[in-house]
Image (cartoon, helix red, strand yellow):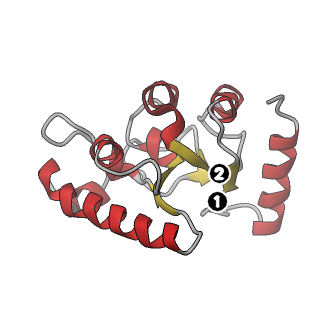
Amino acid sequence: MLKLYNTISRQIEEFKPIADRFNTCGDICKKYGLRFGYHTHGYSYFMLNGQMPVDYLITNTSPDTVDIEMDFYWVVTAGADPVELWNKYGKRVRLCHIKDRMKTAAADDEFSSCNVGEGSIDFAKILPLAKSVGVKYFTVEQERFDDTTPMDAAKADAKYLMNLSI
């Protein structure tokens, strides 16, 4: 179980004020021609009282003013299935965070990103689904640079993604 998960709520109802705040922020953003978005993390995908926080937030926020950014790394790190979530959430996810997870990472290792395409996440399967529901914004992130520089990692990530047929 993720260390971060131990620091958050254990009751799904505690996400109600968060959803309310997101709706308020979304309304303010819309007033000024902006969009409000929520970037998911591992705790978003753990079950609390039979429901995942991301389910609660999607159900209790306005699709007109609150966007969801799915971070594939955190989906997989939490043990959830990105394809299943695409089928479940559809167009509510408007942005994607592309970050790969090392194949050898322990289940409780929160910081095990690697070059996109070298890890355990099947982007060739996931990214076409994202594109098919209208996702237009994809952000690549990498937090770990054991044997490389950030620029070399960015080049490797870009090369992998440009070679995908999506």
Q: Please provide percent x and percent y for residue 143.
A: 60, 63
Q: Nearer the viewer, residue 159 or 91?
A: 91
Mark 2, other Cα within 10 Å: few <14 / some 14–19 / many ≥20: many
Residue shown at 75%/67% (left/top)? 150
Looking at the rendered structure, the secondary structure element under dot 1 is loop
Q: Please provide percent x and percent y for residue 21.
A: 30, 67
Residue shown at 76%/63% (left/top)? 148
Q: Is residue 50 left or right of residue 125?
A: left
Q: Please provide percent x and percent y for residue 62.
A: 38, 51
Q: Amino acid at mark 2?
A: Cys
Q: Amino acid at mark 1?
A: Gln
Residue shown at 20%/63% (left/top)? 17
Mark 1, other Cα within 10 Å: few <14 / some 14–19 / many ≥20: many
Q: Nearer the viewer, residue 136 or 107?
A: 136
Q: Nearer the viewer, residue 124 or 23?
A: 23
Looking at the rendered structure, the secondary structure element under dot 2 is strand
Q: Quadrant of residue 5?
A: bottom left
Q: Quadrant of residue 132?
A: top right
Q: Compute the Cα span from label 2 to label 1.
A: 6 Å
Q: Nearer the viewer, residue 118 or 132?
A: 132
From the image, which quarter does the C terminus lie in? Answer: top right
Q: Residue furthest front?
A: 31
| Residue occupied by mark 2 | 114
Residue shown at 51%/66% (left/top)? 30
Point out which mark residue 142 bears.
Answer: 1
Determine whether label 2 and label 1 are within 8 Å by CB: yes
